[in-house]
Image (spheres, rainbow, N blue to C red):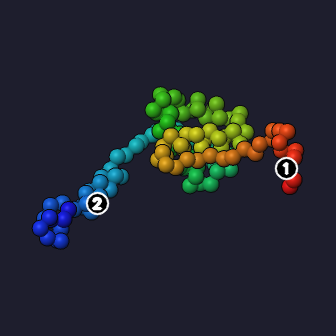
Amino acid sequence: MVDKNQNFPSEGTSSSEEVRAFFDKYFLHQITFPTNQIDAVFGYFLKRGFDEAAARSVSIVLLNQARLENINPFKLIDTLKGVTDAQLSSVVAEVQNVYREKTSFLGFKLASVEETTESRNIKQ
């Protein structure tokens, strides 16, 4: 805050102090899960070819979502066992988008295979 009579900042709290106070409290909230649930979900994603860091990150997000929706994580893994790699990527992206800022979005583009009358007239 700048004093109206001077160009010097006032003696109150500055915005940098407010930001520092916010981020000092940012990592204080701890989330705990039983180790068998973490190991099961983490192991599932490792077996599906995920990198270790990615498997850990996705596991925590899925465990959080399972807790919010009151779903047993073991049943969640059982439902994911029959999906293809593309379907799994879609599910993971969808769940990750729930936790992301609204200005950021994960996804992928599917190529259009629809043949229209107009597209036959375009030379490539």
Taking the image as shown, residue 82 lies to the left or right of residue 105, namely: right
Kind of residue at badge 1: Ile
**Between 123 and 83, the one nearer to me in the picture:** 123
Marker disc for residue 20: 2
Question: What residue is rendered at 87% in x and 44% in y?
Answer: 120
Taking the image as shown, residue 12 lies to the left or right of residue 86, namely: left
Q: Secondary structure at mark 2?
A: helix
Q: Secondary structure at mark 1?
A: loop
Determine which residue is flagged by label 1: 122
Disc on the earlier residue, 1 or 2:
2
Above or below — where is 21 with respect to 41?
A: below
For the C terminus, give its image quadrant: bottom right
Is residue 24 visible in the rendered image? The answer is: no
Marker disc for residue 18: none
Tell me how far mark 1 sits from mark 2, CA to CA. Answer: 57 Å
Taking the image as shown, residue 19 lies to the left or right of residue 68, namely: left
Question: What residue is rendered at 52% in x and 49% in y?
Answer: 104
**Between 88 and 107, the one nearer to me in the picture:** 107
